[in-house]
């Protein structure tokens, strides 16, 4: 019967997800809200298809662990080191200020300081699962707001460790404090064990995992590699749990260490499906766990506490965002995204209960507040996206801050449309690493699906090119599809990075002339080479010999490029310009005619008419 119940529950969860999530996505609400609503509907307080969610949530929280591992895989240690300021500074201040504000409110409501401080610490944490999943879905993780939010969330995961140590010290009754005190190990011994486990994770990830995964990959059995990836994540999580640290933090460290591994992409592709399923299960369990009986018993108290929590954390976060000089849209996004309580609250409240810090009745109320704030977060993000952020836009085009760039390559490519992709693919095929920038967010999302790493940003920004490594790069390819933007980029590069060799795409003949006048000598007109190539094929189709046709094509292009150079040096009026162009055309025809009079007589294959088969 138990197995039957388990299968039925799995069937209900899958049905709820399959029905609600596509509808939510279609309505523009995002998958997170779809999962939460599905959980509310099938939960014990609405349709009653599933019961208590405690055990399910403990299992589903492993999705958060996997998500942190995948986030770590995207972060090189060098980039993480660059983020140390926001992680410690912004993250630390957020936890301290939010704890202080919530503690004062709790004391004002009549709680003793020990209970108020415990609640303040727990509610200061935000939901890693909801925030990261929502930002990733909207493509905002690489923005300034996304990077700042991630830094705060990472510090919060670290802050769970001292919180677990502090909570027993806040116990109201001393007997429970004595029972729960860990006297089996001296503090320095436990510290050594913690340091040893973390060092083992770093050492193993850096020196052991590549040869191990290489050996496993030789078996050419995908399921074994998938099992190995899961074994790694679960093993690290268990090791961290055994020493009393956050499993999510441990797997994040493992992910960062493996960010430069040869098997990073394989690890991502194997873990991603499990992460998605478990996170979906986690969100459903949160929705199903909302106690509507308690909500209906005293709705004003629950709603009041939830609103107070969100507003209090929002104000703290907005103050930090402005002190870090985030733009208004980023400040709002950063503050709205992190204004809820997080999934660690469920764990910490349970620990506070067993430690004698908080009574069971109060924990039930606060758990409902936490779940309600998590449920409201996707809605708040939608409201911010549709109604608040547009107010700060200077024009109709969607505003988005430039991505944080973590590469330092010998060549930079600006513009990754049809022309830029040809350049990038050729470089990639020859193992030449390039830093690629583009200002079209939809184009970036499209090419990223095919495995290309492209950063969002305006190529006309000297600051962005500086962060992209222009100071040490050797060359820059300007492949944008706008003439004014192309010329502006060239001006900026010549002013700020004169050592860079500029290679430019010309949209048309006049654009090529302007680029030559600016001193850019490596220019390729986007239609000239392909047009000449097709022209040669047309001659072959008419019966011309292949080598003659392609020789003619190359000569035509060479002569036309030379005429563009001459026009670049010409400063006459429009009539003289047209006259000069016509003169160049006549000269080209004469050159091709003279080139075609040569006679080729190898192996008795003579030519009566230049280029035409006998």
Image (tube, rainbow, N blue to C red):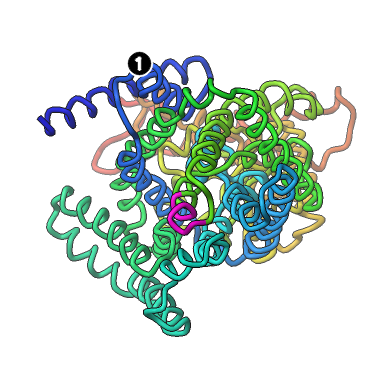
Answer yes or no: is residue 268 visible.
yes
Q: Which residue is drawn at 47% across and 81% down?
A: 187
- Mark 1 is surrounded, within 10 Å at the Cα level, by few (under 14), some (14 to 19) or many (20 or more) other residues, namely few
The N terminus is located in which quarter?
top left
Residue depicted at x 54% and y 36%: 365
Above or below, 476 against 293 in this view is: below
Residue 415 position, x and y percent, is 61, 40
Q: Provide residue 150's location: percent of width, then percent of height.
A: 58, 50
Q: Quadrant of the C terminus?
A: top left
Main SS, magenta region, reads helix
Residue 295 painted magenta: no
- What is the span of residues highlighted in magenta in the rendered image? 350-356
Q: Nearer the viewer, residue 515 or 112?
A: 112
In this image, 298 relative to 318: left or right?
A: left
Element marked by disc 1: loop
Q: Is residue 260 visible?
A: no
Q: Name the residue nearer the viewer: 353 or 161.
A: 353
Residue where numbered disc 1 is placed: 47
Q: Is residue 354 magenta?
A: yes
Left or right of 73? Residue 595 is right
Identify whether 62 is placed above or below 540. Answer: below
């Amino acid at each position: 019967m138990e197995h039957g119940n388990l299968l039925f529950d799995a069937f209900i969860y899958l049905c709820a997800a399959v029905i609600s999530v596509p509808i939510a996505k279609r309505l523009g609400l995002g998958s997170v809200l779809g999962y939460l609503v599905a959980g509310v509907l099938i939960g014990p307080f609405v349709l009653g298809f599933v019961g208590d969610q405690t055990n399910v949530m403990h299992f589903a929280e492993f999705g958060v662990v996997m998500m942190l591992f995948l986030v770590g895989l995207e972060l090189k240690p060098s980039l993480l080191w660059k983020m140390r300021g926001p992680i410690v500074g912004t993250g630390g201040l957020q936890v301290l200020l939010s704890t202080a504000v919530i503690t004062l409110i709790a004391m004002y409501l009549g709680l003793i300081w020990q209970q108020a401080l415990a609640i303040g610490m727990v509610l200061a944490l935000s939901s890693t699962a909801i925030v990261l999943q929502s930002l990733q879905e909207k493509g905002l993780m690489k923005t300034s707001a996304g990077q700042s939010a991630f830094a705060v969330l990472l510090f919060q995961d670290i802050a769970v460790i001292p919180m677990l140590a502090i909570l027993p010290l806040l116990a109201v009754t001393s007997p429970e404090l004595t029972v729960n005190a860990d006297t089996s190990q001296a503090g320095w011994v436990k510290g050594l064990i913690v340091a040893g486990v973390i060092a083992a994770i770093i050492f193993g990830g850096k020196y052991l995992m590549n040869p191990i995964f290489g050996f496993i990959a030789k078996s050419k059995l995908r399921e074994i590699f998938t099992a190995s990836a899961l074994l790694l994540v679960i093993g690290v999580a268990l090791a961290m749990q055994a020493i009393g640290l956050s499993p999510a933090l441990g797997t994040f460290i493992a992910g960062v260490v493996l960010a430069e591994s040869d098997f990073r992409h394989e690890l991502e592709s194997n873990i991603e499906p499990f992460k998605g399923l478990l996170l979906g299960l986690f969100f459903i369990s949160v929705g199903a766990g909302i106690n509507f009986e308690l909500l209906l018993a005293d709705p004003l108290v629950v709603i009041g506490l939830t609103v107070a929590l969100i507003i209090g954390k929002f104000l703290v976060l907005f103050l930090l965002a402005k002190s870090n000089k985030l733009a208004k849209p980023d400040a709002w996004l950063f503050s709205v995204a992190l204004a809820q309580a997080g999934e660690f609250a469920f764990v910490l409240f349970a620990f506070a209960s067993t430690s004698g810090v908080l009574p069971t009745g109060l924990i039930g109320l606060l758990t409902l507040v936490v779940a309600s704030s998590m449920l409201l977060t996707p809605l708040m993000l939608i409201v911010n996206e549709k109604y608040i952020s547009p107010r700060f836009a200077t024009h109709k085009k969607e505003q988005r801050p430039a991505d944080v760039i973590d590469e330092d390559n010998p060549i930079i490519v600006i513009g990754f449309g049809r022309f830029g992709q040809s350049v990038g693919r050729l470089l990639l095929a020859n193992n030449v690493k390039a830093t690629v920038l583009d200002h079209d967010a939809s184009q970036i999302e499209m090419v990223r699906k095919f495995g290309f790493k492209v950063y969002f940003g305006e190529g006309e920004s000297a600051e962005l090119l500086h962060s992209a490594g222009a100071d040490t790069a050797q060359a820059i390819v300007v492949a944008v599809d706008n003439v004014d933007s192309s010329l502006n980029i060239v001006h900026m590069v010549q002013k700020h990075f004169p050592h860079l060799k500029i290679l430019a795409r010309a949209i048309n003949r006049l654009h090529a002339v302007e680029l030559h006048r600016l001193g850019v000598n490596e220019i390729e007109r986007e239609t000239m080479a392909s047009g000449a190539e097709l022209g040669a094929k047309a001659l072959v189709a008419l019966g011309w010999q292949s080598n003659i046709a392609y020789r003619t094509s190359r000569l035509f292009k060479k002569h036309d490029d030379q005429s563009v150079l001459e026009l670049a040096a010409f400063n006459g009026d429009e009539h003289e310009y047209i006259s000069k162009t016509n003169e160049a055309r006549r000269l080209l025809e004469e050159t091709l005619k003279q080139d075609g009079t040569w006679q080729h007589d190898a192996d008795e294959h003579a030519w009566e008419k230049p280029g035409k088969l006998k």
